[in-house]
Structures are given as structure tokens and as C-alpha cells.
Image (cartoon, rainbow, N blue to C red):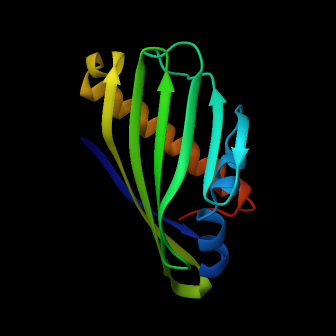
Amino acid sequence: MIQFEGNKQFALPLAEVAAKLSDAAFLVQCLPDVEITEATPDKAAWKLKPRLSFLTGSLHIEMTATERQPGQAIAFKVFSKAMGATSTVVTRLKFEPAEGGSTVVHWIGAIEQVTGLLKAVPKGLMQGAAEKVIEDVWTAVTMKLGGLPSV
């Protein structure tokens, strides 16, 4: 299992950040270059062309809320399927108030399972690709929240 963790700070009130980042429909609408097939507060599904050298074709992704503590925390299970490979990632976000009315989001993501062709991908390559995706997603989410800089 590969795990990632970090903090993001937003210059917005906790209630607003928690509501938006707990909404699967809001999150999927942040992503560029995706074809959204489902978008509800608890579940989103989309297709995209992966920008990863070890995956070709379309990537089908479903994100489902698995734990919800309104205004405090959310967990999502993200299942991805490509030709000959799948992955399961669990992501948890915890929301905390910060100075000046801003919000800190503590996040943890873990690749819990890979199958098929992804099993042959070296851990370092998978970790590097995941870090790039995480960075891109946080950039897109920050822009959708109004372009306010995260600290």
C-alpha cells in the first residue's frame, strides 16, 4: 500500500470548505478534461484519457462517499478501471478551523489495491504519478473554490 498525506489551507470559512469538499459532484466538476457520467453529493463517475505512460485507452473512475461527519470529515473510495487494470484508493479529509477564519484540510490518501497490469508498475513510478495527480487535483479544487491561494 502506498500512502500520501498533507495539509491544505484555504482562506474560506470551515463550513463552506467542508460542504464543498464533501460533495462528490463539486469535486468531479473541478477536474479538467473529464467526461462526467454521474454527479451526486455521494457519488461521482467519469471517464478520462490518462496522462500516464503505463496506462492507455480510457480510464473509468467512480468516487463514492464512505464516511461522512458533516462539517468535520469525509472519506471517499475511488475505484479506477482501465483496460487490463484496476485500482482502489481511499481518501480521507478532515476539516479544522484556522487563524483568521480560514480552514485547514488534513488529507490522507492510500492506494489500497491494484490489479492486472498495474501490479507490474514499479512502486516508485506509481508513487510519482500519484503525486502529480494529487498536485493537479488540489490545484483544480483551489481554482474552483474561487482561486483563493492555499497556504
Q: Nearer the viewer, residue 96 or 149?
A: 96
Q: Nearer the viewer, residue 12 or 149?
A: 12
Q: What residue is drawn where x is 35% and y is 15%? A: 117
Looking at the image, can residue 31 be seen?
yes
Q: Quadrant of residue 126?
A: top left
Residue 34 vs residue 67: left or right?
Answer: right
Quick check: 110 above or below 101? Answer: above
Q: Position of residue 140 (x, y in %)?
A: 65, 48
Residue 87 vs residue 12: left or right?
Answer: left
Q: Nearer the viewer, residue 142 or 126?
A: 126
Q: Position of residue 7 (x, y in %)?
A: 43, 63
Q: Quadrant of residue 47?
A: top right
The N terminus is located in which quarter?
top left
How many labels were placed on the picture?
Answer: 0
Q: What residue is drawn where x is 64% and y is 47%? A: 44
Q: Position of residue 101 (x, y in %)?
A: 61, 86
Residue 105 vs residue 120: left or right?
Answer: right
Point out the residue furthest to the bottom here. 100
Q: What residue is drawn where x is 61% and y is 52%? A: 43
Looking at the image, can residue 13 be seen?
no
Q: What residue is drawn where x is 49% and y is 15%? A: 83
Q: Position of residue 26 (x, y in %)?
A: 70, 56
Residue 130 vs residue 149: left or right?
Answer: left
